Image (spheres, rainbow, N blue to C red):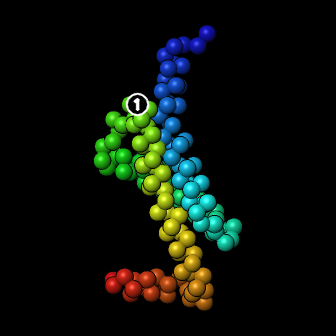
Amino acid sequence: MTEPATTAAGGFALYKLLGLVLGVPLAVAVVMIMTRPRTTPEWAVALISTVVVSIGGGAAVIQYFGLHEWAVDFYGLLALASLHFTCGLPAWVVVRAWFVYAERRRDASLPELVKEIRESVGK
């Protein structure tokens, strides 16, 4: 027979992971359905970037605004999942924009591309 404390701790940990389990895959699925990448490398980079930024960016926002107490109940976890979801969307857009930009300037080197971007931004 298992210990009640061990079972409760495992259940609590699983409950806490609900935010990541819901938020991250939804972010990836939505952006992949909205805009399909042209090549397999573009798809892989965009997918990895979306997952990493969804997890890390969501955690950074939660840490910065002190939203830890939201993880106490189910609806708070749903809100945190949507926060992870929202944080992952910009990564997909940035990666896709970079691939489109770099594809149009295929003959330019990376330093030339960076210099061009800096000049257009005004720095």
User: Split into 4 quadrants, where in the image is the C terminus?
Assistant: bottom left
Measuring from the top left, give residue 47's x and y in whole percent. 59, 59
The residue lying furthest to the front in this view is: 34
Q: Which residue is mark 1?
A: 73
Q: Residue at x 39, y 86 (%)?
A: 120
Q: Is residue 1 visible?
A: yes
The residue lying furthest to the left in this view is: 65
**Residue nearer the viewer, 96 or 55:** 96
**Residue nearer the viewer, 65 or 31:** 31
The residue lying furthest to the top in this view is: 1
Measuring from the top left, give residue 2's x and y in whole percent. 58, 13
Measuring from the top left, give residue 101's x and y in whole percent. 54, 80
Q: Residue at x 45, y 47 (%)?
A: 82
- Does residue 92 appear to the left or right of 76 in the view shown? right
Task: Determine whether the residue tagged by mark 1 lies in a helix, strand or loop.
Answer: loop
Q: Residue at x 34, y 46 (%)?
A: 63
